[in-house]
């Protein structure tokens, strides 16, 4: 059984009865080539697809005949084609069955319901993407609705202090700082540390207006050295703080920066705006 997904289907076993045994629809799958092996169905979904598809076509013809009929062929061709295409897409959703998630129609309906209606205070928060909180002027706090509950979180990029040459006294101080920073979160805020392997990006430094030729030459040489590094990789460390309340998150973020700037890490800064959006997409992508 697959891992539960919020927008999945009924998760029922598809091998329970004769109507729920998986079948491969050869006359459709053969036309799709290798992709056809991913198309499975059951007798129940086949019967439902034929029924819904047939009724949809009859409904489209009924709309045409109840109007101007075939006398106004130019005026009915576009609505008729749109109804047929829409009916075909719905029929394919009914026909296809995901062995681990159930009916594809159920999956689609649950997905669109959560996309359109599962929100609070009359504004939408999408499933996978995120929205910057309207309470954050700097766009450094992100909010998201999950299971009907609203969460706020922020991302801090840090550069660590511990190295192979750290002394025991340094490690002891760092462990105390880390312990105190965790205690400061209490139980209403969660902290998650994410280590990501990325590619270092060096922004070219613009020389000053009064820079000498030697300084300009040095900057150009350093830029060429960086460009020639090729596939160099670097570790990027991020701390994600999450809370149910915006004010609580702001207070706990300030407490965390006190410990971070107190020697727990070398550098730390809160991501905001486009930079935060880029990092979140990379981490959840």
Image (cartoon, rainbow, N blue to C red):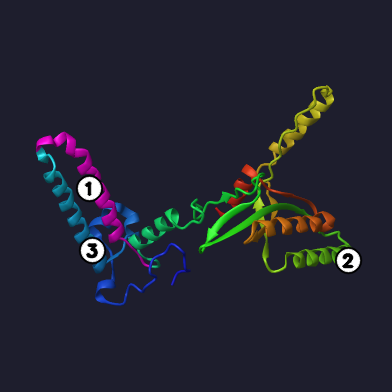
Q: Secondary structure of the magenta portion, mostly?
A: helix
The answer, for residue 141, to whether it is visible in the render is yes
Q: Position of residue 16 (x, y in %)?
A: 31, 77
Looking at marks 2 and 1 on the same chain, the residue that comes earlier in the sequence is marked by: 1
Is 101 on the left or on the right of 59, as rendered? right
Q: Is the Cβ of the residue at disc 1 closer than 8 Å to that at disc 3? A: no
Measure how far apart labels 2 and 3 are at the Cα level: 70 Å
Q: Position of residue 261 (x, y in %)?
A: 82, 54
Image quadrant of residue 260? bottom right
Q: Residue tagged by mark 1?
A: 84
Is 181 on the left or on the right of 238, as rendered? right
Q: Residue at x 88, y 66 (%)?
A: 168
Considering the numbered disc 1 on the image, is that residue within a helix, a strand or a loop?
helix
Q: Residue at x 69, y 45 (%)?
A: 200
Looking at marks 2 and 3 on the same chain, the residue that comes earlier in the sequence is marked by: 3
Image quadrant of residue 229? top right
Instruction: Pick out the residue farthest to the bottom.
Output: 16
Q: Residue at x 82, y 66 (%)?
A: 175
Q: Residue tagged by mark 3?
A: 48
Q: Position of residue 62 (x, y in %)?
A: 14, 49
Q: Which residues are magenta?
A: 71-99
Measure how far apart labels 1 and 3 are at the Cα level: 17 Å
Is 48 on the left or on the right of 208, as rendered? left
Queried whether the magenta region covers residue 120, the answer comes back as no
Q: Residue tagged by mark 2?
A: 168
The answer, for residue 161, to whether it is visible in the render is no
Residue 119's place in the image compared with 272, above or below, is below
65 or 96: nearer the eye?
65
Residue 163's place in the image compared with 139, above or below, is below
């Amino acid at each position: 059984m697959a891992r539960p997904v919020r927008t999945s289907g009924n998760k029922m076993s598809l091998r329970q009865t004769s109507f729920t045994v998986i079948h491969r629809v050869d006359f459709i799958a053969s036309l799709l080539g290798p992709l056809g092996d991913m198309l499975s169905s059951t007798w129940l979904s086949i019967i439902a697809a034929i029924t819904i598809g047939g009724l949809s076509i009859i409904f489209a013809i009924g709309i045409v005949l109840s109007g101007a009929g075939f006398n106004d062929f130019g005026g009915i061709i576009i609505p008729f084609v749109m109804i047929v295409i829409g009916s075909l897409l719905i029929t394919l959703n009914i026909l296809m069955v995901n062995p681990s998630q159930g009916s594809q129609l159920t999956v689609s309906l649950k997905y669109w319901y959560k996309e359109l209606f599962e929100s609070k205070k009359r504004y939408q928060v999408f499933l996978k993407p995120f929205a910057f909180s309207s309470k954050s002027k700097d766009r450094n706090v992100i909010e998201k609705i999950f299971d009907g509950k609203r969460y706020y979180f922020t991302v801090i990029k840090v550069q660590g202090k511990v190295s192979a040459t750290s002394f025991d006294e340094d490690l002891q101080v760092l462990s105390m700082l880390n312990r105190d920073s965790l205690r400061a979160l209490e139980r209403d805020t969660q902290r998650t540390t994410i280590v990501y392997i990325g590619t270092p990006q060096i922004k070219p430094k613009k020389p000053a207006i009064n820079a000498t030729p030697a300084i300009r030459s040095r900057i150009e040489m350093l830029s060429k050295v960086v460009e020639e590094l090729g596939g160099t990789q670097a570790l990027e460390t991020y701390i994600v703080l999450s809370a149910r309340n915006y004010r609580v998150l702001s207070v706990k973020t300030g407490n965390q920066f006190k410990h971070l700037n107190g020697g727990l890490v070398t550098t730390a800064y809160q991501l905001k705006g486009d930079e935060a959006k880029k990092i979140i997409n990379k981490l959840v992508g």
